[in-house]
Amino acid sequence: MSKKLNVLFIPSMNSSVMWWRVQSFVESTYRQCIANFVNPLWFKDLNGGQEWQAKITDGPSYDPIYIRQFVPMIDSGCLQADAIVMQWVHEEGGVELFDSIKTRFPNVPLFMEIDDNLMSVPVYNQSFGAYDPRAESRARAIHQMRESDGMIVSTPFLKEIYSEFNKNIWVVPNSIDFKLWDRVKRRPRSGIRIGWAGGASHSDDMALIEGAINRITKRHKEVKFVFINGPTNTGLPDSLKGNPGVEHHARWEPILKYPSLLG
């Protein structure tokens, strides 16, 4: 019987992104006995970014006690790993950890995981300032791309974009875990309900359809558009506020409860 591959994941993102791109994959491979995939930083209720980057970076969040716990944990995982997958990092501490792993474990393949296009963030996007061509966070991401042994992306388009920085790129599409979604109990409702779920970075996308939403709900009283969070920093676009055919739910749920929120 062949030895199972040991893979260590080091996430940098919050629980939602980590779930779709890392933890659901870890759990699926565990159930199928494919390999030993480990994600020691999985926190199902995490809404902010992973705290380890700020806590190991010089600054107000720097925490020497945390480092004494964090570094040995990562070091132990690397010692047992046949390969390491690190999500793209945002702060200097993330780059320092990446570089130290490269130096300390030169024979263990180190891959970068990313599912965003950092090369062309539009100026209207709330993340533009972080990925402006002059921004340090963008330079850190490019450094990680160039120094990684390979990259994992979610679409062929991203593979094409990042091929300038790394020639070893694999496409692993985003997926959903039907074990969660099949358990959702649909509540009986009358009429036609059209759902929208997303974040504030999609305000310009909403501008394309908000006029149509107002026309449809005016002509067809049985139709209701249901919004979960977004699509602007203040909730709904002004043109949709007060429309009785529009329902808005502005609340966050832990990622494992998200299917029930949409149900």
Image: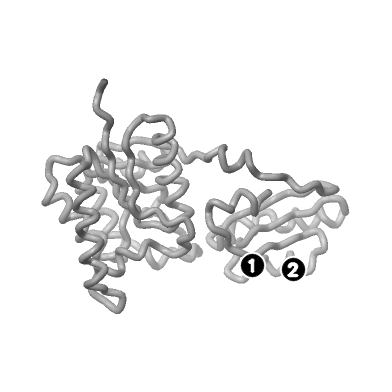
Q: Amino acid at mark 2?
A: Lys
Whether residue 32 is visible: yes
Camera-side residue of 160 and 190: 190
Compared across the picture, whether 256 is left or right of 48 comes to right
Question: Dividing the picture into quarters, in which one does residue 64 lie?
Answer: bottom left
Examine the rendered structure and indicate whether residue 247 appears above or below residue 152. Answer: below
Residue 184 placement, left or right of 242:
left
Mark 2 burial class by Cα count in 10 Å: few <14, some 14-19, many 20+: few
How far apart marks 2 and 1 lie (CA) works out to 9 Å
Q: Residue at x 31, y 57 (%)?
A: 89
Q: Residue furthest front?
A: 1
Q: Nearer the viewer, residue 141 or 180?
A: 180
Residue occupying the far bottom of the picture:
60
Identify the residue position indicated by label 2 in the image: 241
Residue 131 in view (yes/no): no
Considering only vertical position in the picture, is 191 above or below 35?
below
Labels 2 and 1: the sequence-earlier one? 1
The reply, left or right, for residue 226 in relation to residue 72 is: right
Q: Secondary structure at mark 1?
A: loop
Give percent across and percent down for residue 98: 21, 54
Query: Quick check: marks 2 and 1 in contact, CB under 8 Å?
Result: yes
Please say if 2 is above or below 9. Answer: above
Looking at the rendered image, the quarter that the N terminus falls into is: top left
Residue 215 drawn at (x, y percent)? 81, 55
Residue 152, by quadrant, is top left
Circle 2 — which element? loop
Residue 121 percent across, percent down from the top left: 43, 57
Q: Please provide percent x and percent y for residue 13.
A: 39, 57
Give neighbour class at mark 1: few <14, some 14-19, many 20+ (Cα, 10 Å): some
At 26% across and 68% down in the image, what residue appears? 66
Pick whichever, 74 or 163, lies toward us.
Answer: 74
Q: Which residue is mark 1?
A: 235
